[in-house]
Image (spheres, coloured by chain):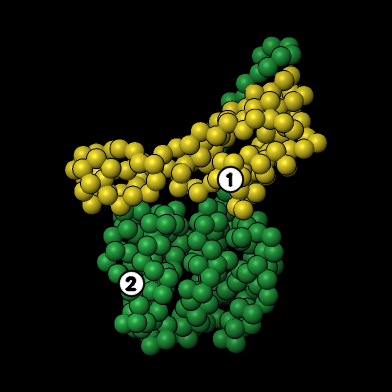
Amino acid sequence: MHELGVAGEILDVALSEASRHAAKKVTSIRIRVGVLRAIEPENLSFLFGHLARGTPAEGALLEIEEEPVRVECEACGVSEAPSFTWECPRCKGPGVSVTGGDSLSILSLDVDS
Amino acid sequence: MGTGGNVRIEVERSILQSADEAAAAIRALLSERKIFALNLISSPGSGKTTLIEALLARFDGKGGVAVVEGDVETEIDAERIRKHGVQVRQINTRSSCHIQPSRLLSVLREMDLSETRLLLVENVGNLVCPAEVSLGEDARVVLLSVTEGDEKPLKYPLVFKTSDLLVITKTDLLPYVTFDVERVRRAARAANPAVEIFEVSATNGAGMSALLGRIEALRETKG
């Protein structure tokens, strides 16, 4: 249920941005979530929808862009993987380090002004 | 921007910004007082409290150590630590699965830290949520006991990616369990090539002096 805290933060940001821009309603919110965050998109959307009830963000669509894991391999450079890995997705070599896939950001929101 | 209709607002900010701001306030408080802080994270039952007790038993100048215990409920851990004669506070997180930095900040503001040089924060037992939130610590320590299985870094990569020290605990039980230390080392290094790995047994004392020495050396870097 760690999605609850994340949903609350998204709502706070959306409402403060909407009020700063004198918007009446938030219609959609785009976020980027790295797969290393172990966020369940359905759970996040459900909790967000629940928290947003009775606010200008009620009914807003949460568009979740999933960020893959970024893997750097000593032998063949940078590639992407759908989840954490200790071998290179390309050459299967062990000389890898995971250097991305932990984003948790709000990109933009659409509002009716 | 038009008058009415649909408008896109570019935001591009971390979802955890308010938590990050509280963590920055903790970092400033610690830095001003030259306190070195560790955030201890693990599954429930990996031995965080026992490791803290074993460290306390070996520290010279315990007056310089303060402990904050995080649990969903009870004061049990704080009572264990209090017996060692150090300043300790318990945070009960109730509905939250990790210590919130804003909560830690208000607890630290209530504590007398005038003599404190080392702060040990024991997070709620959980490998997922505590990994996501900085407490403004100088170093993050993840514990993994040999009874939990050697696949944990593959299953819970974020906590291993964000930790500076990995402490493999309960090594006295290695003869009785299937646990491949090299497998853990390799997976942990894929998550964080700079991770420092220690193998300890708080029960028989193996590896404790190396870990203690490293913590004291890190503390010295804070001045």
Residue type, label 2: Phe
Residue B55: percent from left, percent from top? 46, 80
For residue A77, side relative to residue B2 (left or right) = left
Q: Where does the image place residue B74, in percent across and percent down from the top left?
A: 68, 75
Residue at 50% across / 80% down in the picture? B50
Q: Look at the picture and state if B34 lies above or below B145.
A: above
Placement of A56 over or under B187, stated as above or below: above
Chain identity of mark 2: B
Say which colour chain B has.
green
What is the three-letter code of the residue carrying label 1? Answer: Leu
Q: B221 left or right of B5? A: left
Which chain can be seen in yellow? A
For residue B96, say whether it is visible.
Answer: yes
- In the displayed orientation, state which residue is furthest to the left: A75
Q: Position of residue A68 (x, y in %)?
A: 41, 39
- Which mark's residue is nearer the viewer, 1 or 2? 2
On the image, numbered disc 2 is attached to which residue?
Answer: B179
Disc 1 crowd rating (10 Å Cα; few below 14, some 14-19, many 20+) is some
- Going by the image, does A111 lie left or right of A84? right
Q: Which residue occupies 39% across, 69% down?
A: B149
Going from N to C along the chain, the mark reached first, 1 or 2, is 1
For the C terminus of chain B, which image quadrant? bottom left
The image quarter in which residue B157 lies = bottom left
Q: Secondary structure at mark 1?
A: loop
Res B134 visible: no
The residue under the point 56% across, 41% down is A41
Question: Which residue does the image show at 34% across and 82% down from the upper left?
Answer: B176
User: Can you identify the residue that label 1 sits on?
Assistant: B16
